[in-house]
Amino acid sequence: MENKNLIIKVIGFIQKNPKENLSLQSIAENAGFSLTYFDAIFRQHTGYTPVEYARVYKLTRCALALRRTEKSILDIALDFGYASPESFARAFKNFYGMPPSEYRQKYANTVVTWHDMSGKIANSHFCREYPELKPVDMETALDFCFTHNPLKYAEDIVGMTVAESQVLTLGDPENLEHFVYVSDYDSAEPFIDLVCEAETDAVEYLRLFENQTHLRFNIRKPVSVKWDAFDRRAEEMGLVCKRGYDMIYPGDSVAVPVVAGLSARVLTPEDMPAVKTFQQAGGCTDAHLRAIQFYFERKGNMDMKPVGVFSENGLICLAMPTLDAVRQLRKYDIGAIFALDQNDDAVDLLWKYVIDMCLREQAIIGNSNAKEDADTPASYRVCERIGLVKVAVNCCYSK
């Protein structure tokens, strides 16, 4: 049996037994593979060990019970195999960031909907234009991403929450299998992101949107599977596709090189003159300069950690890794990397220094849209050389 089919089988087994406290041995025996080999390939495909996945899936089912039933917290804890309500509360708070009682109070009997008073005019119009699309609870959409493939859907997990998106589906909102999340952030036209595992389902969304005059949307496709029917339909609709790769560093450690004449370190406010000189030499834009300035002045993204590589001539490479945190997902996006020239030694030093820094914070490291044909420090060619691997093909379609 191919690894992909094996993983599908195991996930099905875990999802059919959410109330069991499954061990690695019991899961592996069901799959018919050795413990060591099975643990490794499962993590490679999902981002979790089998036991971690079983724990996360169990917690998402508990969350659904809190949102959609009147069962007591004690009954839910016992139903799902927790030894006590206290152990359930600890596990739940660790994953959802709040105790079960607070979660129930916040989400019980509430469907997250978008409304005109929010000021999101384009989104509101979009929802009225497509009554076939049913609203989806944001927590349910996040559950889908976390229990399917948090590595593949890392950008969707972040995107849904940061852009305050409206989540909608052509399917069943209670048993979510596919959805779009729509945002009109900083735009007069809504931007659509499609989250879907099956090509046949994805094509149905294309059919729904075929009369959109300014259609633009993203979808993250499987790396190893071609969606020929989807691409044919998109071409018939006059859509142009720009492709990139969502890439993740999968290792547990990285060897930071020692390069003669070069040093890497986290920037401080005292480095702003060097950053300004770097910008004036064409290293980055005014917007990036301002972002770093705001960071030092505590006006901007406090989870940014600007890093530079210095030579005797000053700052020659700059990185702006930014942390996004949703539930247990902690992901540093390090796609904003700049260099004054194509010095591979300096670029490699910068990348590996940043990766090492982020790994020490137990965060995922990724580049959300590496371009294959680009010639930049964050291109696909450089990412592959550094050791990042593709987790999805990021396709951006537009008319």
Image (spheres, grey):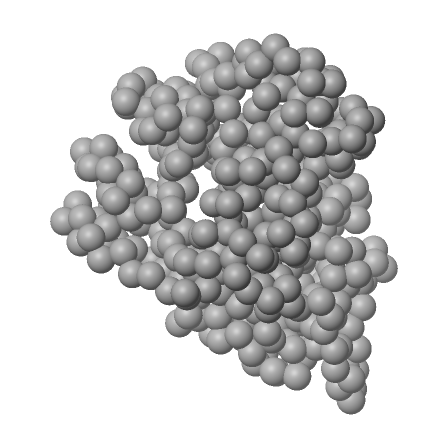
- Please indicate whether residue 136 sits to the left or right of residue 295 in the image: left
Write the residue at 79% across / 61% down: 360
The quadrant where residue 310 appears: bottom right
Which residue is most to the left? 236
- Please indicate whether residue 263 sits to the left or right of residue 118 in the image: right
Write the residue at 33% across / 61% down: 225
The answer to whether any part of residue 159 appears in the image is no
Name the spot of residue 224 as percent of width and height, x first: 37, 64
Which residue is most to the bottom? 260
Above or below, 182 relative to 389: above
Question: In the image shown, does 252 or 51 lie closer to the viewer?
Answer: 51
The answer to whether any part of residue 231 appears in the image is yes
Above or below, 305 relative to 208: below
- Please indicate whether residue 77 sits to the left or right of residue 217 in the image: right
* Count of picture labels: 0
Name the spot of residue 333 as percent of width and height, x first: 61, 55
Name the spot of residue 1 as percent of width and height, x first: 41, 65
Write the residue at 29% across / 61% down: 226
Write the residue at 42% across / 32% down: 176
Above or below, 374 relative to 173: below
Name the spot of residue 63 as percent of width and height, x first: 62, 26
